[in-house]
Amino acid sequence: MDKKMIERINALAKKSREQGLTEDEKKEQAQLRAQYIAAFRAGTEQTLKNVYIVDKDGNEQPLKKAKKQSPFS
């Protein structure tokens, strides 16, 4: 995600608050937000792949994905 895309997201958000958006602008805003979220998730996943837990014996173990829990458990 480059700086121009973030600036455009912010400009659309400001315009939305101040005067509203056209249908085309709403679609553009949704698309840009989806791209931003995808880039953020990819960056976070990459960071977490490089995180290791060190146990009390000094052994490094990579993080494991947490199991999704049901909200009813």
Image (cartoon, rainbow, N blue to C red):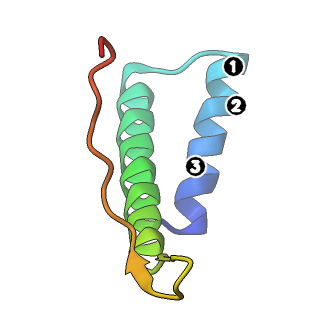
Q: Is the Cβ of the residue at disc 1 closer than 8 Å to that at disc 2?
A: yes
Q: Amino acid at mark 3?
A: Arg
- Name the element at disc 2: helix
Q: Label 2 belongs to which residue?
A: 14
- Name the element at disc 3: helix
Q: Label 3: few (<14), some or many (≥20) within 10 Å? A: some
Look at 59% across and 16% down and name the residue there.
20
Mark 2 to mark 3: distance in Å? 10 Å
Residue 19 vs 30, above or below: the answer is above
Q: Is the Cβ of the residue at disc 3 closer than 8 Å to that at disc 1?
A: no
Look at 33% across and 49% down and name the residue there.
66
Residue 45 image point, x, y percent: 39, 65
Residue 60 image point, x, y percent: 45, 85
Q: Label 2: few (<14), some or many (≥20) within 10 Å? A: few
Look at 41% across and 60% down and name the residue there.
39
Q: What label sits on residue 8 in the rendered view?
A: 3
Q: Label 1 belongs to which residue?
A: 17
